[in-house]
Amino acid sequence: MLIIFDLDDTLIETSSVILPYKLKNLLEYFYKNKLLNNHFDNDYNILLKLTKNFSTKQALEIFLKKCK
């Protein structure tokens, strides 16, 4: 098995390929466990917009603060 680390997005652009899928999974988890009760599609779009302007960690922090 070969494991490759692509820390600078040169092999696969994670921000546009993997990240949206993982954010959707995260929101599904939040809704399934009743951690959020807003509108799924709206929350997903907000998260995608935030990740365009901030790192993923910062985007999640901003999003979760707004949800409190």
Image (spheres, rainbow, N blue to C red):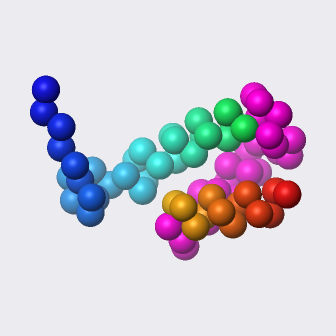
In the drawing, does residue 64 fall left or right of residue 56?
right
Can you tell which quarter of the image residue 68 is in? bottom right
Question: What secondary structure prevails in the magenta region?
Answer: helix
Residue at 32 percent across and 55 percent down: it is 13
Q: Quadrant of the N terminus?
A: top left
* Along the line of sight, the residue nearer the viewer: 53 or 60: 60
Residue 27 visible in rendering: yes
| First to last magenta residue range | 31-55
Q: Which residue is rendered at x = 40% and y = 47% of the image?
A: 17
Q: Residue furthest bottom?
A: 53
Corner quadrant of residue 47: bottom right
Which x, y percent locates residue 43?
74, 51
Query: Could you tell me residue 34's position as x and y percent?
Result: 82, 34
- Residue 31 is situated, as x and y percent measured from the top left of the image, at 77, 35
Residue 25: x percent and y percent?
59, 36
Horizontal arrangement in the rendering, residue 55 relative to residue 48 (left or right): left
Residue at image position (69%, 66%) is 62
